[in-house]
Amino acid sequence: METVLAVSKRPCSFDKVIGQDTLIRSIRSRIEKGRMPKAWLFSGPSGGGKTTLARILAVSLQQEDYSDFGNFPPSDNPIESSSMSSYDIHEINAAQHNKIDDIAEIIEISQYAPNAGSRYKIFIWDEAHRITTQAQQLLLKPTEDATNRAVWIFCTTEPGKLNLTLKRRCARYEVSELDARGIRVLLMRVGKAAGIERLAEFYEAVKKSSILKTPGMILHALEKFASDGDLGTAFQPEGFQGDVFHMVQSMTRGNWKDVSKELGDGKMTAETARGLRALASGYLRTMLLKAGATNKGVAISRTIDEFADNARTYDD
């Protein structure tokens, strides 16, 4: 396939977003009631669509007519880079721009009036948890200031790393993982349009895996499956040769010898490590929900905590 499915088939309108109906209704309700926050926070698992929702929200806020908020004609793709550039919208990767000097410069820009044709000057922060503690402090004042026309949208997989006061100033939304129906709708919509065969087989494998629960992760696996037809490799992060399922099960049992075997020499790129972590975290979250307040649930919760504590190894 010429383009990555997760990018080329990204929804560009709220009515095309799958599995986030409650979240979208809440956003529209705020807008209809005239309660327009100056700061927003989207949190949730990797590949869940946080940045996509942020982009749709940002472009929608720039429109003159809010009567059908977040929806655009099928022929439009307002969240493409070329379309977004016509508005005063700034997308910032906090993994690269997270220090005090970076934040101070952006806050300075936010003081100016929006460009012609824009209602607001909007800043979308991807991986917002990567903003340093001191830099987050600088954001407290501008996110509280209701007099200027700047809007701040934060996206993160780890909201616990954000300043508590900063979070309280945001309209907070947690992006949900897809249920079985959402997965089926996603595969039918994207897979059929792309002419991918054996979708029913792939769907059953995704359901059984308990590991692929977000659109981005599912479509990444679907693209690999479409390329080689191998379900075994479709669910593996690029560059990882071990068995993700066996590794995570060994983690919950505290069998670190088996975990070590699956990891091999442990040498992998940061991208592979992040992909592995996302898959393992998704599986652990699902197992925790199933286990509930049992001894197994406690063990899984402890594993998640250890996993999060060690995540910075490949983030720094």
Image (cartoon, grey):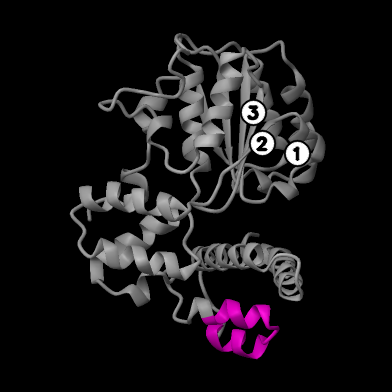
The disc at residue 135 is: 1
Screen quadrant of the N terminus: bottom left
Distance CA(mark 3)–CA(mark 2): 6 Å
Residue 148: horizontal and vertical position, in percent?
Answer: 67, 12
Residue 180: horizontal and vertical position, in percent?
Answer: 43, 56
Distance CA(mark 1)–CA(mark 2): 8 Å
Distance CA(mark 3)–CA(mark 1): 11 Å
Name the one closer to the observer, 252 or 147: 252
Q: Secondary structure at mark 3?
A: helix
- Please, what is the three-letter code of the amino acid marked with disc 2? Asp
- Please, what is the three-letter code of the amino acid marked with disc 1? Ala
What secondary structure do most residues of the magenta stretch adopt?
helix
Which of the marked residues, 1 or 2, is nearer the chain's N terminus? 2
When the figure is inspected, residue 115 is found, relative to residue 307, above or below; the finding is above
Q: Secondary structure at mark 2?
A: helix
User: In the image, is residue 177 part of the stretch drawn in magenta?
Assistant: no
Tell me the residue at 44%/58% (across/down): 217
Residue 242: horizontal and vertical position, in percent?
Answer: 48, 82
Screen quadrant of the C terminus: bottom right
When the figure is inspected, residue 82 is found, relative to residue 266, above or below; the finding is above
Tell me the residue at 40%/54% (across/down): 183
Q: Using the rendered view, name the quadrant where residue 79 is placed.
A: top left
The disc at residue 106 is: 3
What residue is shown with label 2? 102
Tag 2: Cα neighbours inside 10 Å, few (<14), some, or many (≥20)? some
Magenta residues (range): 246-264
User: In the image, is residue 259 part of the stretch drawn in magenta?
Assistant: yes
